[in-house]
Amino acid sequence: ALGEIPVEGGRPEPVKAATGVELGAAFCELLEKLDGSQVPEMSTGATVVVTMTLETLTGGLAAATLDTGDRIAAHTARRLACESDIVPVVLDGRREVLDVGRRKRLFTRAQRIALATRDKGCTAVGCRTAAWFCHAHHDQPWATGGTTDLANGRLLCPTHHRTAHDPRYEIRVLADHQIEFTLRC
């Protein structure tokens, strides 16, 4: 049965469910041990974005911020940077092309990281879905001439992404880059 460990010649012993902290620690250990060279490049996937100053990355004590808004100690960020494929967002960091116009339909990995850093999560009013779970959405659809650029992109959770493509809803972009959906009459 699920949740039980078979014991030879006896009754199964129940398995204690892991806590969220235990699961998180196990996941971090897995990420630190995996060789990412065999993993295909995807338009979505697990990426940990850590925002910090260059001073913090090179030895400072200030806390770093994850794309979820959670803060981690500087030594934790440096440890992850040594052994994992995290993406540090650092002032004076490596430059990457973020505006690709009409040449590509899908947002690049660098663009998704920039969107996550800017948007912090789903941009629908009231939604608190973390950036890592969101889709990159074109405000003006690529199929109708929209560009694959940060100015035309935003993060939306799967539910709000479906709503954005549902013709029954009107979309209004607010001054703070959030969007509001209204059911058409």
Image: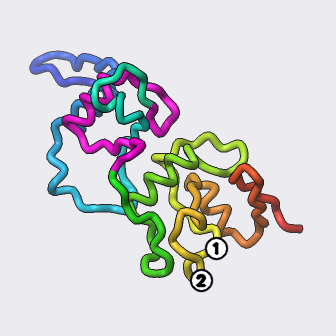
Relative to 178, is 25 on the left or the right?
A: left
Residue at 28% over, 30% down: 58
Whether label 2 touches label 1, CB < 8 Å: yes
Whole-percent x, y for residue 83 in the image: 19, 36
32 shown above or below 174: above
What residue span does the magenta drawing correspond to? 65-93
Q: Is residue 68 magenta?
A: yes
Mark identifier at residue 145: 2
Residue lying farthest right? 185
Q: Measure the C-alpha gap from mark 2 to mark 1.
A: 7 Å
Please tell me which of labels 2 and 1 falls first in the chain: 1
Q: Where, by quadrant of the figure, is residue 179 drawn? A: bottom right
Mark 1 lies on residue: 140
How would you rate the neighbour count of disc 2 (Cα within 10 Å): few for under 14, some for 14-19, many for 20 or more?
few
Whole-percent x, y for residue 185 in the image: 89, 68
Q: Where, by quadrant of the figure, is residue 138 drawn? A: bottom right
